[in-house]
């Protein structure tokens, strides 16, 4: 008996709601119409934002070149390696090259003829850049958002080029340092060889 009473109460509640809706159907439909129209107008008024992306194969570079050590170097897992690359891609060194190459201090200002400060341009650029690892691979995806789809693509490509140039520059410096060490070692070896030859000549003279 108690169960039937509860069921009746629930049914009455539903019927009460339905009666209210029927009585206020004009208001409900008007509110629904206003929401739909507002959403539609807002969608059309908003300037579309385009997304462009580029992917980079990022292989971990070997440790510092050691010419005089013939032992095999085993690569160790570094959980922070890709996070470090994210930071490098969005670093001032890389993005400054992109800004200068594409004249972004002017193009990101939003006003014709206005020139943004470098720090403000960097801030705007970083806000519209997303870097992520692509499907647990050694590929990084750089995503750029901009109201101009062509500029978004140019920025994405320019970031990839500047990042690769930065990595190449670091590698060239490592090789240059290694060559300089080799020259130093050769110079020291020649000095030791000269000293040995002199000592040998002295020994020969004494024996004579």
Image (cartoon, rainbow, N blue to C red):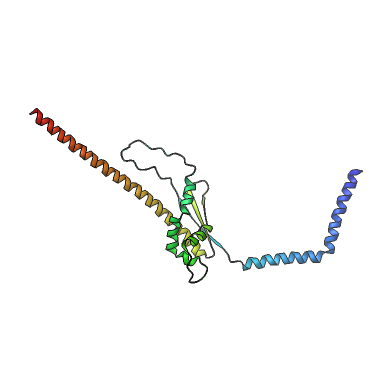
Q: Nearer the viewer, residue 3 or 93?
A: 93
Residue 24 shown left or right of residue 147 in the figure: right
Q: Quadrant of the N terminus?
A: top right
Q: Is residue 138 visible?
A: no
Q: Nearer the viewer, residue 119 or 83?
A: 119
Q: Is residue 78 above or below residue 38?
A: above
Report how many numbered discs are placed on residues in the image.
Answer: 0
Instruction: Identify the residue shown where x is 45% and y is 62%.
Output: 99
Provide residue 113's location: percent of width, then percent of height. 48, 71
Q: Quadrant of the C terminus?
A: top left
Residue 53 shown left or right of residue 101 in the figure: right
Residue 91 shown left or right of residue 32 in the figure: left
Q: Is residue 185 visible?
A: yes
The residue positioned farthest toward the top in the image shown:
207
Provide residue 86's location: percent of width, then percent of height. 49, 50
The residue positioned farthest toward the left in the image shown:
208
Provide residue 50's location: percent of width, then percent of height. 55, 62
Q: Is residue 91 above or below residue 35?
A: above
Residue 60, quarter of picture: top left
Instruction: Identify the residue shown where x is 41% and y is 37%.
Output: 74
Provide residue 35's location: percent of width, then percent of height. 71, 64
Instruction: Identify the residue shown where x is 40% and y is 54%.
Output: 165
The residue positioned farthest toward the bottom in the image shown:
112
Q: Is residue 134 above or below residue 115?
A: above
């Amino acid at each position: 008996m108690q169960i039937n009473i509860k069921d009746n109460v629930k049914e009455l509640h539903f019927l009460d709601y339905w009666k209210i809706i029927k009585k206020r159907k004009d208001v409900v439909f008007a509110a629904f119409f206003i929401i739909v129209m507002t959403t539609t107008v807002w969608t059309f008024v908003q300037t579309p934002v385009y997304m462009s992306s580029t992917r980079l194969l990022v292989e971990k570079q070997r440790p510092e070149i050691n010419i005089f050590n013939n032992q095999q170097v085993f690569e160790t897992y570094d959980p922070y390696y890709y996070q470090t690359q994210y930071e490098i891609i969005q670093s001032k060194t890389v993005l400054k090259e992109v800004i200068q190459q594409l004249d972004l201090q002017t193009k990101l200002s939003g006003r014709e003829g206005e020139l943004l400060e470098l720090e403000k341009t960097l801030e705007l650029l970083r806000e519209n850049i997303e870097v992520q690892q692509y499907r647990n691979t050694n590929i990084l995806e750089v995503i750029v958002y901009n109201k101009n789809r062509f500029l978004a693509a140019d920025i994405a490509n320019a970031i990839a080029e500047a990042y690769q140039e930065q990595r190449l520059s670091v590698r060239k410096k490592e090789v240059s340092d290694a060559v300089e060490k080799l020259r130093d070692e050769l110079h020291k070896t020649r000095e030791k060889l000269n000293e040995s030859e002199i000592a040998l000549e002295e020994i020969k003279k004494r024996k004579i």
